[in-house]
Image: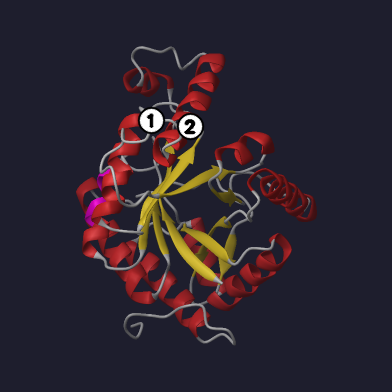
Amino acid sequence: MKLGLLEFGTGCISPLDIVENVLIYAEKAETLGFTRFWLAEHYGASPAYCNPEALVPIIAGLTSRIKVGVAGLLMAYHNPFRVASAFKLLNNLFPGRIDLGLAKGRVPGEIGAYLSPDLDVSDPAVWSDTLRRNLNDLVAYLTADGHAGLITPRTGYTPELWTLASGLNNIEAAVQLDTALCKSLFHHRIDDPIREAETLLQYREAYYQKHKKRPVVNLAVAGICAESGREARRIRESLSRPAATYNELIGPPEFIRDELFKLGELYGVDEFIFLNLAEKTSQKLKGITLLARTFSTAVNPVFTPLTEAV
């Protein structure tokens, strides 16, 4: 099993301090053996940034092997040619280490007007059509389907593309993009986990039928890890900006490890992305250190730390 991290850039300190602490957090994640470090594009969650792509090359430059990316860019509001060019260049500067997650989220009306001044993306039909077109164009640019030679560098490495999804309401559209898939378990309440797992199985079968290969799939979960369940719950209750997340894993590292192994068996995945809900950097660092130690001492070790966790 592999474990990466998702970060929203939240906290109760100054914006510039949040950015500095995100960099510290990412460096620590690599040292502990986490496989990915993803930054979310989110308007309102972080007082520090809403453009995570600006931090990707900084984090990639401060680290040496952890994969770095966005999860994800809200593609109804971005020029697909510019995104393809930027992320292809990044993945040639840091070969094989850049992830590009594609999301369908919406932004507040005023922000949407600034991001897309020539389109009325507040109109659901316009937003939906723009999203579909931008996603298809972006994938086409990066896979050179009819666009060979347009995206520079003209040789080299293409970033790993990820579709971000929660309910998989449109399996056909997700399959059509031919990307890896990150399914979120924290965006909505799950009352029937078996049915959720069956939906993911349907996606896998449809993907294989179309592309004749197995899709790469991981799951995103949210929670807080602390030395005890009581401490983890205390941290959760003390958040100054309570997160609207579901199916949270709140507890000591052994509990979270066991729950992830159960989810892995149910959904048939061996990689998770963990959204650490703690706001204080000291609590974030402590939580991922506890997780790394617990996973590295399991029967089948997950982590290969660069140095011994401290």
Could you tell me residue 217's position as x and y percent? 59, 56
Q: Is residue 84 left or right of residue 243?
A: left
Which residue position holds label 1?
Answer: 80
Asked if the stretch drawn in magenta spans residue 223, the answer is: no
Quadrant in the rendering for residue 249? bottom right
Front one among 38 and 145: 145
Q: Earlier in the sequence, mark 1 or mark 2?
A: 1
Q: Is residue 19 visible?
A: no
Inter-mark Cα distance, 1 to 2: 7 Å
Q: Dot 2 surroundings within 10 Å: few (below 14), some, or many (20 or more)?
A: many
Start-end of magenta stretch: 54-58
Which residue position holds label 2?
Answer: 135
> Could you say whether the residue bearing mark 1 is in a helix, strand or loop?
helix
Of the residues shown, which amino acid type is indicated by label 2?
A: Leu
Q: Are marks 1 and 2 in contact (CB under 8 Å)?
A: yes
> Could you say whether the residue bearing mark 2 is in a helix, strand or loop?
helix
Q: Dot 1 surroundings within 10 Å: few (below 14), some, or many (20 or more)?
A: many
Could you tell me residue 114's position as x and y percent? 32, 20
Residue at 71% across / 68% down in the picture? 265
Asked if the stretch drawn in magenta spans residue 57, the answer is: yes
Residue at 32% across / 68% down in the picture? 65
Quadrant in the rendering for residue 292? bottom left
Of the residues shown, which amino acid type is indicated by label 1?
A: Pro
Q: Work out which quarter of the rendered image holds the C terminus and state it.
A: bottom left
Q: Is residue 146 left or right of residue 123?
A: left
Front one among 256 and 239: 256
Residue at 41% across / 38% down in the picture? 144
